[in-house]
């Protein structure tokens, strides 16, 4: 699925905004999933869908007054409880209000990095990475059941998370069918074993990269670069000019080598587990 709007000559503020708006467009794309609930208003946005991964259950675009924030947090927790969610993420960005939202969330028991992750952007016409993808590394788009399960297993091992978190993306993808799924999943193989993953999503005029990971035993072999580069090349072939992501500490050096640079945006992700 390709959006029709493509960012061509953005300002620095527009590039920073594109990091968060691509993420939020990804959340909106989940409305096509069976049973998804999506609510957007001036104060905050929420989405809830069936896959067993907190990425599919979240709060974003928060614009609250300091006086109402604590009450709203209670209301949101109750909303997810009423929907039977076992957990959810509360996302923050550089425009989140109140400005101390991250501190408020952590005091309420949410788990996350107070500093957030730096937003980064790259001009796809100026990628500095001249490597060819090594012949020992095979990267494909995961579409069929077997390759989706390979993606699931590599994703879980790379991020040291439950296999169910990867299965959620498999379930979501299969529920929509390859003609309708709004994201692309990539899986990388080394010696015919699935070792790395990435996800590409077109939205807000840019190509957004997510779920970039490599299993521990396959790191420092150029695989992280390859699994990042492949979706960038595909985005360029679809006439996209810019790619965005928000970086982990581990991936930062790889993204810098490829030509990504920091923009004025920080993305925070705060996890809450619910009791039922």
Image (cartoon, grey):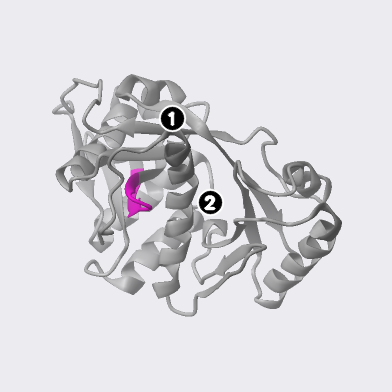
| Residue at far bottom of view | 35
| Image side of residue 28 versus residue 266, left or right | left
Q: Position of residue 229 (x, y in %)?
A: 26, 33
Can residue 158 be seen from the camera position used here? no
For label 2, the crowd category at 10 Å Cα-Cα, with few meaning under 14, some 14 to 19 and many 20 or more, is some
Q: Where is residue 243 in the image (x, y as percent from the top left)?
A: 33, 39
Q: Residue at x 83, y 64 (%)?
A: 71
The picture places residue 185, in percent across and down from the top left corner, at: 31, 52
Q: How crowded is mark 1: few (under 14 residues within 10 Å), some or many (20 or more)?
A: few
Gap between marks 1 and 2 measured at Cα: 16 Å
Mark seen at residue 162: 2
Task: Name the dominant secondary structure of the magenta segment.
Answer: strand
Residue situated in front as seen by the camera: 127 or 140: 127
Asked if residue 42 shows in the view, the reply is yes
Q: Does the magenta stretch include residue 204?
A: yes
Magenta segment range? Answer: 198-207
Identify the secondary structure beneath mark 2.
Answer: loop
Q: Where is residue 151 in the image (x, y as percent from the top left)?
A: 34, 50
In terms of sequence position, does the residue under pointer 1 or pointer 2 come before the other? 2
- Between 67 and 274, the residue placed more toward the observer is 67
The quarter of the picture where the N terminus appears is bottom left
267 left or right of 179? right
On screen, residue 123 above or below 159: above
Q: Name the residue under label 1.
A: 216
Q: Residue 134 carries which label?
A: none
Q: Residue at image x 60%, y 56%?
A: 61
Q: Are marks 1 and 2 in contact (CB under 8 Å)?
A: no
Q: What element carries label 1?
A: helix
Q: Does the magenta stretch include residue 254?
A: no
């Amino acid at each position: 699925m390709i959006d029709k709007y493509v960012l061509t000559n953005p300002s620095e503020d527009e590039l920073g905004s594109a990091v968060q708006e691509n993420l939020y467009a990804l959340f909106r794309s989940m409305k096509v999933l069976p049973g998804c609930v999506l609510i957007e208003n001036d104060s905050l946005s929420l989405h809830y869908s069936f896959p067993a991964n907190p990425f599919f259950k979240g709060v974003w675009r928060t614009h609250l007054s300091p006086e109402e924030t604590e009450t709203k947090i209670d209301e949101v927790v109750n909303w997810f409880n009423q929907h039977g969610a076992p957990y959810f993420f509360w996302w923050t960005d550089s425009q989140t209000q109140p400005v101390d939202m991250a501190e408020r969330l952590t005091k309420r028991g949410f788990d996350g990095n107070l500093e957030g992750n730096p937003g980064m952007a790259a001009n796809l016409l100026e990628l500095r990475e001249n490597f060819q993808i090594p012949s020992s590394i095979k990267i494909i788009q995961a579409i069929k059941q077997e390759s989706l399960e390979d993606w699931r297993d590599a994703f879980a091992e790379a991020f040291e998370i439950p296999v169910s978190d990867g299965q959620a993306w498999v379930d979501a993808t299969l529920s929509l069918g390859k003609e309708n799924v709004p994201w692309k999943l990539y899986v990388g193989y080394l010696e015919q074993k699935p070792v790395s993953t990435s996800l590409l999503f077109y939205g807000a005029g840019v190509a957004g990269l997510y779920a970039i990971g490599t299993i521990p035993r396959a790191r420092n072999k150029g695989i992280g670069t390859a699994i990042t580069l492949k979706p960038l090349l595909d985005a360029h072939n679809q006439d996209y000019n810019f790619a965005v992501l928000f970086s982990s500490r581990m991936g930062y050096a790889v993204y810098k080598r490829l030509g990504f640079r920091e923009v004025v945006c920080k993305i925070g992700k705060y996890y809450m587990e619910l009791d039922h």
